[in-house]
Amino acid sequence: MDAGAGAQWEKAGALALLRRDWNRPEVNALYGLPFADVMLEAQSVHRENFDPNHVETASLLSIKTGGCPEDCGYCSQSAHYDTGLKATPLMDRADVVATAQRAKDAGATRFCMAAAWRSPKDRDLDQVCDMVSAVKSLGMETCVTLGMLKPEQAARLADAGLDFYNHNVDTSPDFYGKIITTRILQDRINTLAHVRDAGIKVCCGGIIGMGEGVEDRLAMLVLLANLPSHPESVPINLWNEVKAVPVNDTADRPDPIALVRLVATARIMMPKSVVRLSAGRRHMSDELQALCFLAGANSIFIGDVLLTTANPGAERDANLLARLGMTSGFD
Ligand code: SAM
Ligand code: DTB
Ligand code: SF4
């Protein structure tokens, strides 16, 4: 490792500092280190902050599917594209709770409820708050992702006992307008601030493989790591194909080594955040996932489906974690 990288490690390793002043050149340099060096740094940071042999297991449920007024160019649920997805209304609380119980029995410790809304209506929020309280009483961590929130809506979710709110920045500031035109990045940042102010933990990350460059991926990490506080959870999604959405025209499956480098860089920049290898694991070999865990990824979604697209089944995941000697909610 060269002296410059060593200096960065000193800073990243001094955890009290939790740096939020990352700049692009130093992040480019970290990302571009020889593979063994960036991996060593990432693993060192990881071991200082987490059990490196443990992976968190979360489960997703789409509680309100499709018909979304936003035009996110990657998403099956946007009403702007003819993706063939059947829209369904907000689920009943009893069905959500039964699904959460099954997810818990199958090894999930966190239950994330997602709705295809630009922002929730107040009457919808009443129902979601009831779902949050009920799922929490099963002994699971709760997460919801409902689109943009007003400060009072975030406060109501906090009162219901919500643990995490997922709201992704999705990509770099420069690339944002190429994939979404119905909102701006600042809208996302405003909601993240309302969530924080309400005392809810933040889950915030993005998607790769939409045609963005490595520069965009690193700019996204800089954006995340320079937020007023690091998100407690950072999901890194590999774009899961959806037919008839604009991203098909630009999508480009990232080099697997580039994905591992990105995970390692995220781990170094946000040492105390849980980094989730989120959507797209069905496209990853066991070996690639193992490298991502070595690089500091320590959370996955389990179950056959994410929201509307496929995920590796529990059998494959449990088998992989067992071969790696990793503990999880499967145990
Ligand atoms: N409507 C809310 C929102 O956008 O915040 C919540 C649901 S939305 C489906 C949650 C996240 O899923 C998006 O921010 C995006 O990062 C991710 N996502 C959506 N479609 C995806 C896809 N095809 N592949 C990977 N990630 C995807
Ligand atoms: C996140 O970052 N990934 C999850 C969760 N947050 C809500 C969603 C992944 C969705 C993948 C596409 C689908 O299944 O529709
Ligand atoms: Fe709607 Fe969320 Fe899909 Fe965008 S990502 S279209 S906001 S459901």
Image: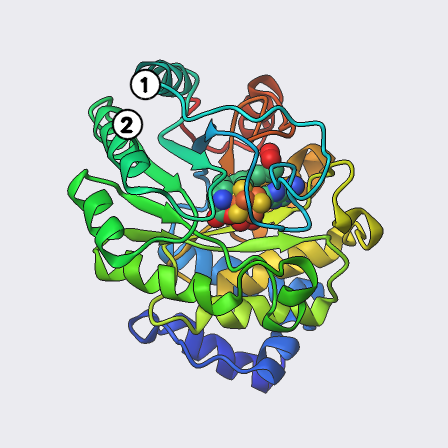
Q: Nearer the viewer, residue 17 or 14?
A: 17
Q: Dot 2: what SS?
A: helix
Q: State whether label 1 is within 8 Å of ligand 2.
A: no
Disc 2 target residue: 131
Circles 2 and 1 in contact, beta carbons < 8 Å: yes
Residue 106: percent from left, percent from top? 43, 17
Measured Cα–Cα span from mark 2 to mark 1: 7 Å
Query: Mark 1 belongs to which amino acid?
Result: Val
Mark 2: amino acid: Met
Quarter of the render that holds ligand 1: top right
- The image quarter containing residue 26 is bottom right
The picture places residue 101, in percent across and down from the top left corner, at: 34, 16
- Choose between 109 and 184: the one closer to the eye: 184
Please tell me which residue is depicted at 62% across the width and 28% down the height of the picture.
311
> Relative to residue 103, is residue 281 depicted above or below?
below
Instruction: Report the side of 222 relative to 249 (left or right).
Output: left
Q: Using the image, tell me which numbered label, if any, was put on residue 97.
A: 1
Which residue does the image show at 51% across and 37% down from the upper left? Answer: 300
Dot 1: what SS?
helix
Measuring from the top left, give residue 331's x and y in whole percent: 41, 22
